[in-house]
Amino acid sequence: MKARMTIATGLLAASGLLLSACGTGDDQPDPSATTTAPPTAAPAPTASDEPAIESAEDLVGEWSDPAAEWTVTFSADGTFSEDFQGNEGFRTGTYEVEDGIVSLVGGDGNTDNGEIEGEGIVFRLGTLTRS
């Protein structure tokens, strides 16, 4: 029994020595071991942060949403034509842009409004981007 106590005491003393060797003795971190990244500023606004569509003239051309199989062609005279799921000229009418909203006023009497977000126009059916 005395031998077991001697072994246990020896093991405790050895583990204490090992643990004390792991620390530097002071609680201060080594400044050469740590690096601090300099603070970064917010990125400056770029041209893509600004709305790409400000007037009806900015829409002229073909816009589409391939996932919805939907294409809208905006003409310079203020008219539009929609192709939907392979049906060309599915719907026609006039369009206007006001306060960030594109309104498609169809000859069928229905008006669809889409919100300009960056370089796209978000409608219920999908998001149109320039083709």
Image: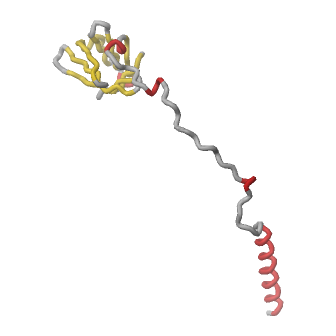
Q: Is residue 73 left or right of residue 14?
A: left
Q: Residue at x 27, y 10 (%)?
A: 78
Q: Residue furthest left?
A: 109
Colour scheme of the rendered structure = secondary structure
Give how far across and how far down residue 34 sits, in percent: 70, 53
Give how far across and how far down residue 74 sits, in percent: 32, 12
Image quarter (top left, top right, bottom left or bottom right) of the N terminus = bottom right
Image quarter of residue 10 = bottom right
Q: Residue at x 26, y 14 (%)?
A: 90
Identify whether 37 is placed above or below 109. below
Q: Is residue 107 left or right of residue 7?
A: left
The tally of labels here is: 0
Give how far across and how far down residue 18 sits, in percent: 79, 72
Image quarter of residue 130 = top left
Image quarter (top left, top right, bottom left or bottom right) of the C terminus = top left
Q: Residue at x 80, y 80 (%)?
A: 13
Q: Residue furthest top?
A: 77
**Nearest to the observer: residue 131 or residue 48:** 48
Give how far across and how far down residue 29 sits, in percent: 71, 60
**Nearest to the observer: residue 112 or residue 29:** 29
**Nearest to the observer: residue 47 or residue 87:** 47
